[in-house]
Amino acid sequence: MINQEVLLKLEHFCAYQERCHAEVVTKLYSLKITPDEIDAVIVRLIETNFLNETRFACSFARGKHRIKHWGKIRITNELKMRQISTFNIALALKEISAEEYETTFQELSEKCWNSIQEKNTLKKKKKFCDYMLRRGYESFLVYDKVTFLEKEI
């Protein structure tokens, strides 16, 4: 038997923003719910489409790329941390078109390079590479770009 008050609370929790299973389970544990009840609530949320891991992964990837300008590596790692399956991660990454990814990378890299005030070229290149790699862009893209930008100096 599912506690209706808990179910309503979780439906609101999931309707407010896309959630992954791990977030919902954590929320249920914080409400001091038994493991059997947790399983029942999760099943009910999935049946009523309040909880959908594929939808969460796709939404997460689109949002983090468009708003925070994260690269595919960072998005993949963040989704893995949230225990999303590799199948859903692959689907989520397909949400980002190659043109959009390339444009975002070019704009972010130009902005980053121009904002670094370092006079020493080697230090500037290191700061640039560290920043772009931390954002989750592939190393070959970052190193190709830094080589190109270095030639412009």
Image (cartoon, grey):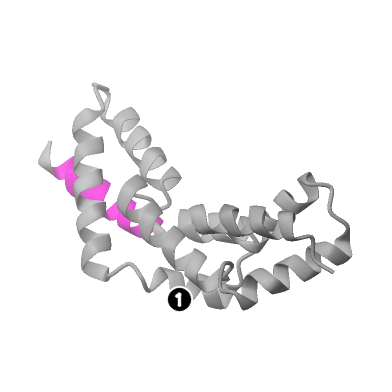
Q: Which range is magenta? A: 138-151
| Crowding at mark 1 (Cα within 10 Å: few <14, some 14-19, many 20+) | some
Q: Nearer the viewer, residue 103 or 116?
A: 103
Is 66 inside the magenta-drawn segment? no
Q: Residue at x 27, y 61 (%)?
A: 101
* Tally of numbered discs: 1
Location of the C terminus (image quadrant)? top left
Q: Is residue 103 above or below residue 114?
A: below
Amino acid type at image mark 1: Leu
User: In this image, 35 relative to 4: left or right?
Assistant: right
Q: Secondary structure at mark 1?
A: helix
From the viewer's side, name the closer residue of 25 and 97. Answer: 25
Residue 137 visible, this orientation: no
Please name the residue shown 67% across and 56% down the image. 24
Q: Position of residue 85 (x, y in %)?
A: 61, 72
Looking at the picture, does residue 75 appear above or below residue 122? Answer: below
Place of residue 119 in the rendered image (x, y in percent of width and height, measured from the top left): 23, 21
Residue 142 in the magenta stretch? The answer is yes
Q: Is residue 2 left or right of residue 134?
A: right
Residue 126 placement: quadrant = top left
Question: On the image, numbered disc 1 is attached to which residue?
Answer: 91
Q: Residue at x 28, y 70 (%)?
A: 97
Where, by quadrant of the figure, is residue 93 drawn? bottom left
Instruction: Report the quarter where the N terminus lies.
Output: bottom right
Residue 39 shown left or right of residue 126 in the figure: right
The residue most toward the front is 4
Residue 47 horizontal/vertical position (percent): 63, 78
Q: Residue at x 45, y 59 (%)?
A: 60
Comparing 75 with 60, the one in front is 60
Counting from the top left corner in percent of width and height, residue 65 is at 35, 55
